[in-house]
Amino acid sequence: MRLENTYLWNEIHQQPEVLRTLLEAERENVARLVEDIRARNIRHVMIAARGTSDNAGRYAKYLLGATNRFVVSLATPSLFTLYGQPPDLRDVLVLGISQSGASPDLVAVLSEGRQQGALTAAITNFPDSDLAAQADHVIGLHAGREQSLAATKTYTAELAAVALLSTTLAGDEDRQHALDVIPAAVGATLSSCTTIDRAAERYRYMRHCVVIGRGYNYATAFEIALKLKELTYTIAEPYSSADFLHGPVALIEQGFPVIVIAPQGALIPRLRELTATVRQYGAEVVAISDDDEILSQARVPLGLPAPVPEWLSPITAVVPGQVFAMLLAHTRGIEVDHPRSLHKVTETE
């Protein structure tokens, strides 16, 4: 099958329109949620999510923490479902993030939050799902049906929903304007991905790699690594640049692939140092960046053509990773819409 005829190719390219629709359609719902957060003086958010949505939760930890000064934690669902010892959720926003809204363990977290009197909210592509039924507020993703097993458009929609929540809480018009132009930035990034097929051919036989990001793009490292695992069966391990230097750097040998996610921002000096260090040890660097120095050090430079504020960069920086994983899978003869062992809805307890 031609790649352009796959669900995955089309869903990746639907992302600008999905983002545009979400940002227009969900402003009022998010505003109502913000009113409740303020009325109840909530300062702690606990996020329940799995898989790709868990990576959106990692982004929320940084964004809601840095911009809105909230304490943000990721839930441990087994405390609710298997141990029967949930934490005290009073004065907490319990936020479920799930494409399907169907996993029983995530539903259990919101249900317990509701029983304890917590404010509950869901970000989901299915507003009539079991998860949404336990939420006081529902933010829809407006992604349409996602038929490929690997989530792409729902992931960036989840990031945008989190960004809309943060921006509305902040009440900052400049941040709102920056968010409003994100669909166009994603479109420009997609248009610039025309050379990634050569990178996919180069790494056709890659079996191991690491993916490195930090700060807001720590989430991006996890998401790109997940896409490489799901679609290409590559053992791809995500790290922050700091954690990687605390031991895993010993993995590096001549030709070892290191994917570095490095949009402009506060971490650029450290990511430049990291890139130089792994090159010194013999790594081949694949760089997703808009920084000329980092791109010049990369064996495979994947430039980001539409610079955005660092806090929004995960929405654009993940796109070359999605395309790379898709093209690498196609190069290997893998059916990209149906990678082995996966199901669209995974229900865990």
Image (cartoon, grey):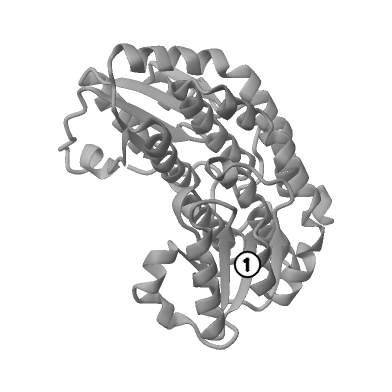
Residue nearest the viewer, comparing 134 with 271: 271
* Residue at image coords 79%, 70%: 198
In the rendered image, is residue 60 in sight?
yes
Residue 156 in the image: above or below residue 249: above
- Callout 1: few (<14), some (14-19), or many (20+) C-alpha neighbours within 10 Å? many
Residue 2 position, x and y percent, is 84, 56
Mark count: 1
240 lies left or right of 231:
left
Residue 154 position, x and y percent, is 59, 38
Residue nearest the viewer, comparing 282 with 199: 282
84 lies left or right of 114:
left
The image quadrant where one finds the N terminus is bottom right
The single residue placed furthest to the bottom in the displayed view is 254
Residue 264 position, x and y percent, is 59, 53
* Residue at image coords 29%, 22%: 42
Amino acid under label 1? Ile
Residue 283 in the image: above or below residue 296: below
Residue nearest the viewer, comparing 112 with 342: 112
Q: Identify the residue under disc 1.
A: 294
Residue 139 position, x and y percent, is 51, 22
* Residue at image coords 68%, 55%: 320
In the rendered image, is residue 10 in sight?
no
The image quadrant where one finds the C terminus is top left
Q: Secondary structure at mark 1?
A: helix
* Residue at image coords 50%, 59%: 213
Residue 297 in the image: above or below residue 342: below
